[in-house]
């Protein structure tokens, strides 16, 4: 009966290297928990990384 617990769940993020600009940044899990999505901080290019079963094993991904 505590809805507050859901609200408090921290957003998961993934560190990623944006190949387009050679910069590191963070992308965040979408609300369905199926992928991490975000944009390159420099050129605003959208990037998404799918989350497999049990989550991703890798810490860093390269944006392509
Ligand atoms: Zn970029």
Image (spheres, grey):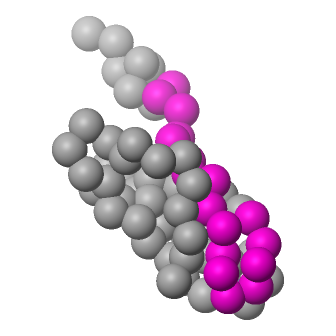
Q: Is residue 43 above or below residue 22?
A: below
In the rendered image, residue 46, in percent from the top left (x then y), is placed at 54, 82
Q: Position of residue 29 (x, y in %)?
A: 45, 53
Residue 53 falls in image quadrant: top left
Q: Is residue 58 visible?
A: yes
Q: Nearer the viewer, residue 21 or 46?
A: 21
Horizontal placement of 44 versus 59: left or right? right
Residue furthest left as drawn: 53
Residue 45 is situated, as x and y percent measured from the top left of the image, at 61, 87
Residue at 37% x, 46% y is 56
Rendered-image quadrant of the N terminus: top left
The residue nearer to you, when weighing 42 against 5, is: 42
Question: What residue sits 47% from the left and 28% below the top?
Answer: 9
All told, the count of numbered labels is 0
Q: Quadrant of residue 15?
A: bottom right
Rendered view: 3 above or below 14:
above
Residue drawn where x is 32% and y is 54% of the image: 51
| Residue at (51, 83) in percent of width and height | 64
Asked if the magenta segment contains residue 17, the reply would be yes
Vertical comparison of 4 with 53: above or below: above
Q: Is residue 60 magenta?
A: no
Residue 37 lies, in percent from the top left, at: 47, 67
Report the residue that reaches farthest toward the top: 1
Q: Quadrant of residue 55?
A: top left
Q: Which residues are magenta?
A: 8-24
Q: Is residue 27 visible?
A: no
């Amino acid at each position: 009966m505590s809805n507050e617990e859901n609200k408090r769940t921290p957003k998961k993020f993934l560190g990623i290297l944006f190949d387009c600009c050679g910069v590191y940044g963070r992308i965040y899990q979408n609300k369905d928990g199926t992928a991490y999505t975000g944009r390159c901080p420099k050129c605003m290019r959208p990037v998404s990384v799918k989350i497999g079963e049990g989550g991703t094993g890798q810490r860093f991904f390269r944006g392509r």
